[in-house]
Amino acid sequence: MKLHRVDLKRQYNRYRSEIDAAIKGVIHNTAFIGGEYVRSFEENFARYCGKQYCVGCGNGTDALHLALVALGIGRGDEVIVPAHTFVATVEAVVSAGATPVFADIEPDTYTLDPGHLSSLINSRTRAVIPVHIYGHPCDMEGISGVLEGKDIFLIEDTAQAHGAILDGRMAGTFGVAGCFSFFPGKNLGAYGDAGGIVSDDETLVKKIRRIRNHGREGRDDSFEKGINSRLDGLQAAILDVKLKHLEDDTERRRKVAALYTSLLSDVPGVVPPVEKPGARHVYHLYVIRADRRDQLGDFLKNAGIENGVHYRIPCHRLTAFRGDYGGESLPETERAVDEILTLPIFPELQPSEVRYVVRKIREFYGIEKGSH
Ligand SMILES: *Cc1c(COP(=O)(O)O)cnc(C)c1O
């Protein structure tokens, strides 16, 4: 059996006629940049999240950058980010001119540890960017508690958590801005690069709309120092089709994850992901902790099962960014990166395929086949 970690072809085949029609429509109307398809997706995605506004942009990294810059964050400011995230979270802070400060994570959900966050706040701290990593919402109550009464912006990196919920509220709606990536492999993915910011703050949204389009409003004057980070019509039209199926896709992911977790529960050496009470995990990635992680990864690869490590080097140890860092160790992050392994997950993954993966994991650890 050959199993991809993500198989976008299967999803295209499910929605083929709708996607093809959407693409034809955009070309027919030559609505390539901005225009009706972008407006439609922005409205629909804002509604899905329960926010007033969504601003589409070029990618998820730009979404974070735009939010930071529009909030006036830059040189001399500190922005606290978890060290255990995709490098883009850190890049956005650096490209805004601010200094990233790395926080440790909670060992069960891999998300920002509010206790450690609290110890890092000082007079230069202007923002915190919690990351709902793998699709599990962060401890927003804990984080909000730490920020209460302080003049610090809460910006969410929701690139892996479209549709994740905590206590009835969508991930990306707790702070002043929720930043999304629609990279093809994300839970809501375009057919190229795309991103977006959701917010209820009209002034902020207006500013972001200008900055993403060269600072312009109308044709002539630039009102802000801007960039070019627009969402294009083809991506917006494809995203609008896929948004209609996002809840169904999420439920499929959750079924795949539930099957993995139940089959892995009695495998010593493996710790499946958790879902905290009140949380809806959307399983962008299905990440286990595993004894002899690298050997298990190789063993699965040899059995045709693609797998990966998200992420092998924590951000405070990346060559490009470790100069910004005092070198203090972040024990939970550093332990996690040596133990985590990402198994295949996507909405179309079949129960027989999940069983195959688990059978191979049991074989690796020398466990008798038993009832599985
Ligand atoms: C994917 C991702 C981003 C960046 O998104 P791009 O669209 O690739 O720029 C940012 N943060 C996290 C946690 C991500 O997974």
Image: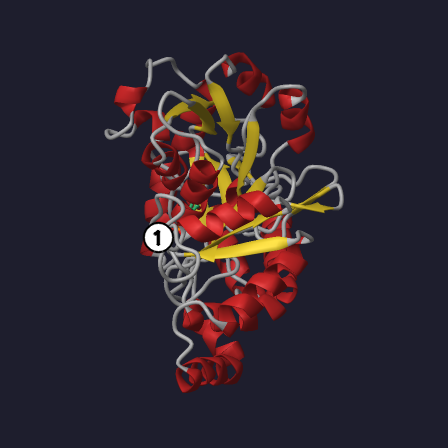
Instruction: Determine the image quadrant of residue 23.
Output: bottom left
Q: Is residue 251 visible?
A: yes
Note whether 280 is above or below 80 in the view shown.
below
- In the structure shown, which secondary structural element does the residue marked by tag 1 occupy? loop
Note whether 2 is above or below 167 in the view shown.
below
Residue bearing mark 1: 214
Q: Residue at x 52, y 57 (%)?
A: 187
* Quadrant (top left, top right, bottom left, bottom right) of the C terminus: bottom right
Q: Identify the amino acid type marked 1.
A: His
Q: Position of residue 325 (x, y in %)?
A: 33, 18
User: In the image as oriented, which residue stretches furthest toward the left?
Assistant: 319
- The answer to whether residue 305 is left or right of residue 19 is left
Q: Position of residue 148 (x, y in %)?
A: 67, 21
Q: Residue at x 42, y 76 (%)?
A: 31
Instruction: Determine the image quadrant of residue 83.
Output: top left
Q: Residue at x 43, y 65 (%)?
A: 7
- The answer to whether residue 316 is left or right of residue 258 is left
Q: How would you rate the neighbour count of disc 1 (Cα within 10 Å): few for under 14, some for 14-19, many for 20 or more? A: some
* Quadrant (top left, top right, bottom left, bottom right) of the N terminus: bottom left
- The answer to whether residue 130 is left or right of residue 303 is right
- Color scheme of the displayed model: secondary structure
Instruction: Determine the image quadrant of residue 266.
Output: top right
Note whether 107 is above or below 371 in the view shown.
above
Q: Is residue 372 visible?
A: no
Judging depth in this view, the residue of 295 and 53 nearest the camera is: 53
Judging depth in this view, the residue of 364 and 247 nearest the camera is: 247
Q: How many marks?
A: 1
- The answer to whether residue 110 is left or right of residue 307 is right
Q: Position of residue 45 (x, y in %)?
A: 60, 60
Q: Residue at x 61, y 47 (%)?
A: 202
